[in-house]
Image: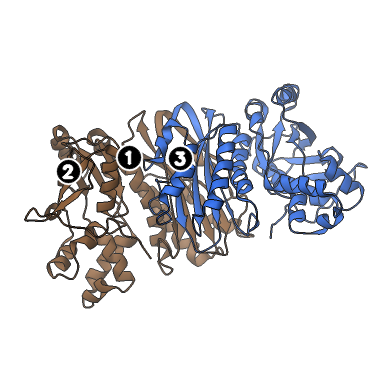
Chain colours: A blue, B brown
Amino acid sequence: MTQSDKPISGEDSLIARYFKPLATDPGAFGLDDDAAALRAAGEDIVVTTDAIVEGVHFLRDDPPDTLARKALRVNLSDIAAKGAVPAGFVLTLALRGAEEAWLKPFARALGEDAAHFGCPLLGGDTVSTPGPLMISITAFGRVPQGTMVHRAGAQAGDRVFVTGTIGDAALGLDVLRGGPVAAALADDVVGRDFFAARYRVPQPRNALAKAVRTHASAAMDVSDGLAGDLTKLCAASGVAAVINVTSIPLSSAAAALLARKAIDIETLVAGGDDYELLCAVPSDHVDAFLRDARQAKVAVTAIGGLIAGLSPPSFLDGQGRELKLKRLSYSHF
Amino acid sequence: MTQSDKPISGEDSLIARYFKPLATDPGAFGLDDDAAALRAAGEDIVVTTDAIVEGVHFLRDDPPDTLARKALRVNLSDIAAKGAVPAGFVLTLALRGAEEAWLKPFARALGEDAAHFGCPLLGGDTVSTPGPLMISITAFGRVPQGTMVHRAGAQAGDRVFVTGTIGDAALGLDVLRGGPVAAALADDVVGRDFFAARYRVPQPRNALAKAVRTHASAAMDVSDGLAGDLTKLCAASGVAAVINVTSIPLSSAAAALLARKAIDIETLVAGGDDYELLCAVPSDHVDAFLRDARQAKVAVTAIGGLIAGLSPPSFLDGQGRELKLKRLSYSHF
């Protein structure tokens, strides 16, 4: 990008060629200036930043197109959780070199997602590094003044909802690393591909943002595992939670593995990288939330409720017995 | 920072302890949420991002306090060049580990600069890396709607101004690397320290932002060398420039080295890391610009003028002869 002050030497034009088409917002000035301008007519600009590092957050042989999508989507997921509408993003790429074979599919996929989610590239910096590839994105969203949804704000009596299905991405990471799930699915290439795709390309729930902003008392995205992230939301809100494990929405593929006892429930509720939304919804908003979610075509499932107290969330099985989780979240690598 | 989804394992509280005090803006929510909210009442939010990488943009043994200041100030310099008032920043730190001995002086210096320049920490992400240390900052500023100053916009007839003195930082890098300047200053520790400090801790000219916004037709900061950056401003504006080399403001220490022929002028005009401002000012605004700069207590110097044409800038010596520069900007390392 030409906004870079320290570009990959001699590769400016290559980078500009691939990233300029993504700078569709007039405030990006075609990446020809030192900064972008984000117009805000009485709205708040929601700002979030997430970086992914080769060998830490993604695998060395992950394809560049899925990396591009994941890097943007983990930020879009935060924007959605805060009830905001995407407004754009800036990209910092630390590369060992600027290879066309990598940059071309990376930029194409990033551009497709930017267009699909209405989140144009506003600027960036490209730096050379002798170390691992790193993709850092700061993304912006808009909310009406003072309406950003917080982690804090949930109350005793609120229902707890999650979007989509939980745990698939953790199984996908296991598949890609050739772990026990890969072994259990040795004869099931479709299953392996399904889980790998859920790990590599999360589905941010931006379509639900308005419903979250209108109805949720608190929300966050599930990135480090449902159990751990729910613990954080409860701690920020000063409440406790009771979760019915049998209500947690699972993909049919994950449910089948669980039925076969190839995995345990802990792998799913403590596994990371879901990028689903976790919301607390006051009971008098539940019907309207469900209706708005249906209109937004985002599956939401009630998994329990909030109660007074400061103890960690309880996860109850089908017989009402409390599961003892050895860990709340999953630590990669 | 607690906003990190993938923190340095087990070090969240250490990081939170050092960075929370920097999150003085109410929109940072004490770094306890997944995002920040930036209020904007009819203003444009100017966004710029710049990353620095160990071994590429800074030296491995650079002290953490100067790194913190440099990482923030290179962004503040862009905010100033665009005529904007600082509004805050987000920080992405890629660390090999979270060492208190490094984090403490880093966070303290960053906090001092954030307070001094009115640019609070709004959020961030801390990731672990097996590779070089990287500090990536995205900074925000505010301008009245539509008033961001661009690289494009300069016209033939405009005067060219720079702030401060040019070339000191390039000499500082040479000193730190033990190059010819270090040798020429073997007996002059004060001189060596002066140049090293100019390299390590640039002085962003945020006090001049309003004068730039009011009077400049185009502006940018000088980060890759005056000659190269002027070439970019001229290309973006579709004009040419004639610069009087003898007018270029030099520190007395740099002027002394030049007089001794220990360095040549090219080292100064093509050297990087100045982080001074380069502005084009229409002639009918020159008096008011000089007055406002004086009020802002920022030294500005007219170094030449813009003419019609698309040729690269001409650098004329005291006898009006054109210097042939072998290079326009300096490539580090």
Dot 2 amino acid type: Arg
Please give the chain letter of the residue carrying mark 1. B
Spatial separation of the CA atoms under disc 3 and disc 1: 21 Å
In contact (CB < 8 Å): disc 3 and disc 1: no
Give the tally of numbered discs.
Answer: 3
Q: Name the residue under label 1.
A: B82
Please give the chain letter of the residue carrying mark 2. B
Dot 1 falls on a residue whose secondary structure is loop
Spatial separation of the CA atoms under disc 1 and disc 2: 19 Å
Q: Nearer the viewer, residue B78 or A82?
A: B78
Dot 2 falls on a residue whose secondary structure is helix
Q: Earlier in the sequence, mark 1 or mark 2?
A: 1
Q: Nearer the viewer, residue B227 or B324?
A: B324
Q: Name the residue under label 2.
A: B294
Closer mark to the observer between disc 2 and disc 3: 3
Closer mark to the observer between disc 3 and disc 1: 3
Q: Name the residue under label 3.
A: A20
Q: In this rendering, does residue A306 appear at all?
A: yes
Residue B289 in percent (x, y) is at 18, 38
